[in-house]
């Protein structure tokens, strides 16, 4: 861990290859008057919008929508089965993957019909029945649309991956979030924060994209309510997709068991650190309290990890949320070699999702080396299981 002491607050960095853009964003965070104690950068850190992805910041008295980001509740779901790798023959794997592709919409695709309201978080509590809610939430406005997004994967770096561990036990992993619902909530409250900061002549420069909501404002309370709904939606979304996969595995195999884990890595929460109750913003970072289970994916050609947190106070008890990009999407599409990336995956026997140049933004070479990332956070987490990919579905 390196300390950068050039700004108003120190920056603690677990990154060995910190890009200049991400460093500048971290410096902006460190100079915020309400930043608490220090800024922490996880080893997968790279430039984002306003706040670097892989960044952790605690604030006093304010909440920053852009320090959570647009995919509120994005996170990981991992399922460990009692099946062995030898049980999942090529024929059964093909059947399973076809079932996933046929039943889980990806990319911008949604379901053609609304899911049953019982699958949605809160039931109807947020939608005008609770008289204590005096405003019309974005989640109310977007509710009908969201019922068609439940159980959908999304695009970008979201994925479903079939894996095996060092004991040849079959796992599967899902990376997804709150879909368009979280995007609408994030943009709405960031725009409100911008207007409030303009009205009260905030000293935070507008071009830093770090407009904030005072914690005692109605707008902050509304954001936290809607963010909470998006977190539940994102978790339900991952569970819904997991049920689809588990149902097919139940058809293919008899007498087996499974265990599930789920974590968010885009959210803000009230926590106690360095003597104060503060708002911890994790944007592409996973909670790693002592003994807490975490999920750290690699890319579709590398290992992923189940970890246990060590509760390191200097990281605000956090760890990385993945390998982290080392190339922008357009740069990867322009510079990576399609044949080489496909060969790399096929030589490992991985049923992958790279078909053309447009897919190279999610090629393994577009990401940092996950082994280095894990080595750099040995003081943040301990590895419980290493998982290697067998087959991947991406948006």
Image (cartoon, rainbow, N blue to C red):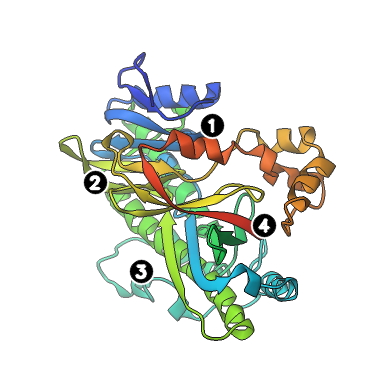
Q: Which residue is mark 3?
A: 126
Task: Please give left or right for residue 270 compared with residue 393 in the image.
Answer: left
Q: Which residue is mark 1?
A: 47
| Pointer 2 or 1: first along the chain | 1
Q: Which residue is mark 2?
A: 271
Q: Residue at x 70, y 44 (%)?
A: 363
| Pointer 4 or 2: first along the chain | 2
* Of 255 and 187, the residue lying toward us: 255
Please identify the residue farthest to the right as the structure is shown. 339
* Of 137 and 360, the residue lying toward us: 360
| Residue at mark 4 to residue at mark 3: CA–CA distance | 32 Å
| Pointer 4 or 1: first along the chain | 1
Secondary element under disc 3, as helix, strand or loop, is: helix
| Residue at mark 4 to residue at mark 2: CA–CA distance | 34 Å
Secondary element under disc 1, as helix, strand or loop, is: loop
Secondary element under disc 2, as helix, strand or loop, is: strand
Q: How many marks?
A: 4
Q: Can you give x and y, in whole percent of width and height, for residue 115 in the image?
A: 54, 78
Q: Is residue 217 visible?
A: no
253 relative to 328, above or below: below
Q: Residue at x 25, y 43 (%)?
A: 215
Quadrant (top left, top right, bottom left, bottom right) of the N terminus: top left
| Residue at mark 4 to residue at mark 1: CA–CA distance | 22 Å
């Amino acid at each position: 861990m390196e300390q950068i002491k050039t700004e108003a607050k120190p920056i603690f960095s677990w990154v060995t290859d910190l890009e200049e853009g991400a460093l500048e964003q971290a410096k902006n965070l460190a100079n915020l008057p309400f930043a608490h104690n220090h800024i922490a950068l996880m080893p997968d850190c790279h430039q984002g919008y306003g706040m670097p992805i892989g960044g952790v910041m605690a604030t006093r008295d304010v909440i920053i929508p852009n320090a959570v980001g647009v995919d509120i509740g994005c996170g990981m779901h991992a399922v460990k089965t009692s099946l062995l790798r030898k049980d999942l023959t090529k024929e059964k794997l093909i059947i399973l993957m076809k079932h996933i592709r046929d039943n889980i919409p990806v990319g911008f695709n949604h379901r053609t019909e609304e899911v049953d309201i019982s699958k949605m978080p809160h039931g109807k509590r947020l939608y005008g029945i609770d008289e204590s809610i005096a405003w019309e939430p974005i989640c109310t406005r977007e509710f009908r649309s969201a019922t068609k997004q439940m159980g959908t994967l999304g695009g970008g770096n979201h994925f479903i991956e079939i894996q095996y561990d060092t004991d040849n036990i079959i796992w599967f992993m899902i990376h997804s979030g709150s879909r368009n619902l979280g995007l609408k909530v994030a943009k709405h409250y960031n725009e409100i924060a911008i207007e409030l900061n303009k009205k009260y002549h905030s000293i935070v420069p507008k071009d830093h994209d770090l407009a904030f909501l005072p914690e005692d404002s109605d707008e902050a309370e509304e954001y936290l309510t809607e963010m909470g709904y998006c977190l539940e939606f994102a978790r339900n979304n991952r569970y819904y997709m997991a049920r689809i996969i588990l149902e097919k595995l139940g058809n293919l195999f008899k007498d087996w068991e499974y265990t599930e884990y789920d974590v968010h890595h885009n959210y803000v929460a009230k926590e106690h650190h360095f003597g104060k109750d503060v708002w911890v913003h994790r944007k592409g970072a996973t909670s790693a309290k002592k003994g807490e289970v975490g999920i750290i994916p690699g890319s579709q050609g590398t290992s992923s990890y189940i970890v246990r947190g060590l509760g390191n106070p200097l990281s605000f008890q956090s760890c990385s949320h993945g390998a982290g990009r080392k190339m922008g999407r357009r740069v990867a599409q322009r510079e990576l070699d399609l044949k080489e990336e496909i060969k790399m995956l096929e030589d490992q026997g991985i049923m992958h999702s790279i078909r053309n140049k447009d897919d190279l933004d999610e090629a393994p070479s577009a990401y940092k080396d996950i082994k280095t990332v894990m080595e750099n956070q040995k003081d943040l987490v301990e590895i419980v299981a290493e998982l290697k990919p067998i087959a991947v579905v991406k948006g």
